[in-house]
Image (tube, rainbow, N blue to C red):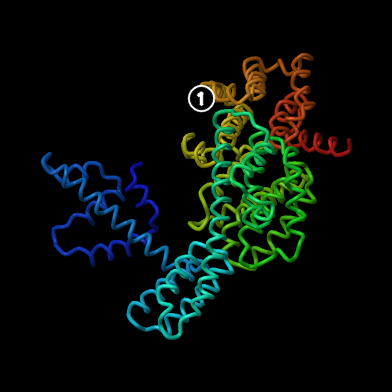
């Protein structure tokens, strides 16, 4: 998809009407073809696009038209975002813009009131870049009656410069760690997370005190959580979890302006304990998460699907499958434009997994609704998610007797991901695939002692203790035990807890 089509795809039906009105107001001539081009992009009319400028001589005119339409679309989207966003950050920006306009037009008394309010908001939110612009503006007009004391302004400005430098170092460190994480994920780079963290902190000269903010704790936990997900071993990040617990239990750290980071941290903690099979602890953090979500509608919407996903997973692996499935169905029934496509896909594949583990054929239907390309899933959901989704599809097709289709998917999976799995030292996935293939080619092999031993040996490996990995292994065990994979995995989890 080209960039213009991608931008047009961001518009809702109501946005399209408003954007057309926006173009009509801007059009000075009657022969402008931007509205026609927009209609043709909406309907994907290739023939119509070719007719828009029939002569080859007019190819440059067509590209110029596309460029102007894209520029207007970007302008419309930026104005819409600025006007419709009701966050405190945007309020501070709006007040800054209004204050500058009023100062330029000599309405100084109201201008300084706007800027004072903007400064209070920016301070609360620790928006140091906005504060920088705002204080520079106040310094520029400090000679006017009603302005702040020049010396006091200078002190605030220099102090804010220090805050900006500290945040810049933290952001550079975070960006560097994200880049390293990508190399771990896509290239199989082997690193020790703790050593990498310490080396990064030294590289960017970050103090311990700098790390004691909600934003930095969130960033560290994000990196740690991603690292654990790639390694499929959440025990590796326990020390970061313990430090985070100590931080959020300190009531002096709690502020409304940190709400996004606080909720995100609780989400990571709930996910960590879920993956460690500590379902009660996970549920406890989810309750704290919901309590905070209910204080601000913006964050309730943002985290709604993620909260329900973890809640359903907790219930499912605690044995309440019916409740978990009902919760996911309810979540999908209320999906709308406000929710991210990635969150919706997460809910849908989870529902497909729940149904498949309980031997419900509706899981086939749920897979048909996962319609995006592997390339999209790899980019948006990550390689691990996409590999898991493709493996699951092989198993589900086999489970319901579609052996040829299952073999076809298995071979496609091997062609696409074998090189990546070998590069990232994930031979265990290929070993699992080999066991599945043996069963597909010779169904009775599951009753042979050697085959059973190979499958059961997977349960004894520490790297396979993750609940999702156990669910895959349970699928194979269920073949010879004549049970559902759900019954098997619940049994494995309960035995592990009692042990």
Q: Is residue 102 above or below residue 202?
A: below
Crowding near the residue tagged with mark 1, few <14, some 14–19, many ≥20 C-alpha atoms within 10 Å: few
> Residue 43: x and y, percent?
30, 48
For the view shown, which residue lies furthest in the front direction?
A: 151
Q: Which residue: 61% across, 40% down?
A: 352
> Residue 17: x and y, percent?
32, 63
Compared across the picture, whether 84 is left or right of 128 comes to left
Q: Which residue is mark 1?
A: 416
Compared across the picture, whether 465 is left or right of 65 comes to right
Q: The N terminus is located in which quarter?
A: top left
Compared across the picture, whether 306 is left or right of 377 comes to right
For the view shown, which residue lies furthest in the right direction?
A: 499
Q: Is residue 356 above or below residue 298?
A: above
Circle 1 sits in a helix, a strand or a loop, which is it? helix
> Residue 305: x and y, percent?
60, 53
Compared across the picture, whether 240 is left or right of 15 comes to right
Residue 496 location, quadrant: top right
């Amino acid at each position: 998809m080209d960039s213009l089509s991608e931008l047009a795809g961001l518009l809702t039906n109501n946005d399209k009407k408003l954007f057309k009105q926006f173009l009509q107001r801007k059009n000075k001539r009657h022969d402008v073809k931007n509205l026609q081009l927009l209609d043709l992009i909406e309907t994907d009319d290739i023939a119509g696009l070719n007719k828009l400028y029939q002569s080859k001589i007019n190819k440059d005119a067509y590209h110029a038209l596309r460029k102007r339409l894209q520029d207007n679309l970007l302008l419309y989207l930026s104005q819409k975002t600025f006007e419709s966003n009701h966050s405190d950050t945007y309020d501070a920006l709006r007040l800054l813009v209004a204050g500058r306009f009023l100062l330029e037009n000599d309405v100084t008394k109201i201008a300084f009131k706007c800027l004072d309010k903007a400064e209070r908001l920016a301070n609360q939110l620790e928006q140091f870049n906005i504060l920088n612009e705002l204080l520079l503006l106040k310094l520029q007009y400090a000679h006017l009656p009603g302005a702040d004391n020049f010396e006091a302004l200078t002190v605030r400005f220099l102090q804010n410069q220090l805050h900006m430098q500290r945040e810049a170092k933290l952001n550079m460190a975070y960006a560097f760690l994200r880049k390293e994480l990508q190399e771990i994920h896509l290239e199989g780079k082997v690193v020790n997370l703790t050593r990498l963290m310490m080396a990064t902190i030294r590289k960017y000269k970050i103090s311990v005190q700098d790390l004691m903010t909600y934003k930095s704790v969130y960033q560290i936990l994000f990196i740690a959580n991603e690292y654990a997900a790639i390694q499929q071993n959440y025990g590796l990040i326990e020390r970061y979890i313990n430090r985070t617990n100590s931080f959020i239990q300190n009531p002096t750290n709690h502020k409304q302006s940190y709400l996004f980071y606080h909720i995100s941290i609780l989400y990571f903690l709930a996910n960590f304990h879920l993956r460690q099979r500590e379902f009660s602890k996970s549920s406890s953090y989810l309750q704290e998460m919901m309590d905070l979500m209910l204080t601000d509608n913006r964050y309730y919407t943002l985290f709604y699907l993620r909260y329900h996903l973890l809640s359903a997973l907790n219930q499912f692996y605690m044995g309440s499958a019916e409740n978990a499935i009902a919760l996911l169905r309810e979540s999908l029934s209320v999906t709308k434009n406000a929710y991210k496509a990635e969150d919706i896909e997460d809910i849908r594949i989870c529902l497909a997994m729940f149904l498949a583990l309980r031997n419900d054929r509706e899981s086939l239907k749920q897979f048909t609704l996962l319609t995006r390309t592997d390339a999209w899933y790899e980019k948006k959901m990550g390689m691990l998610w996409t590999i898991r989704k493709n493996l699951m599809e092989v198993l589900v097709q086999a489970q319901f007797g579609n052996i040829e289709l299952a073999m076809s998917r298995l071979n496609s999976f091997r062609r696409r991901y074998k090189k990546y799995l070998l590069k990232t030292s994930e031979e265990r996935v290929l070993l699992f695939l080999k066991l599945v293939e043996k069963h597909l080619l010779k169904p009775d092999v599951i009753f042979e002692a050697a085959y059973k031993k190979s499958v059961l040996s997977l349960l004894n490996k520490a790297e396979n203790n993750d609940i999702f990995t156990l669910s895959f292994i349970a699928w194979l065990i269920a073949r010879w035990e004549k049970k559902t994979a759900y019954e098997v995995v619940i049994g494995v989890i309960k035995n592990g807890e009692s042990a």
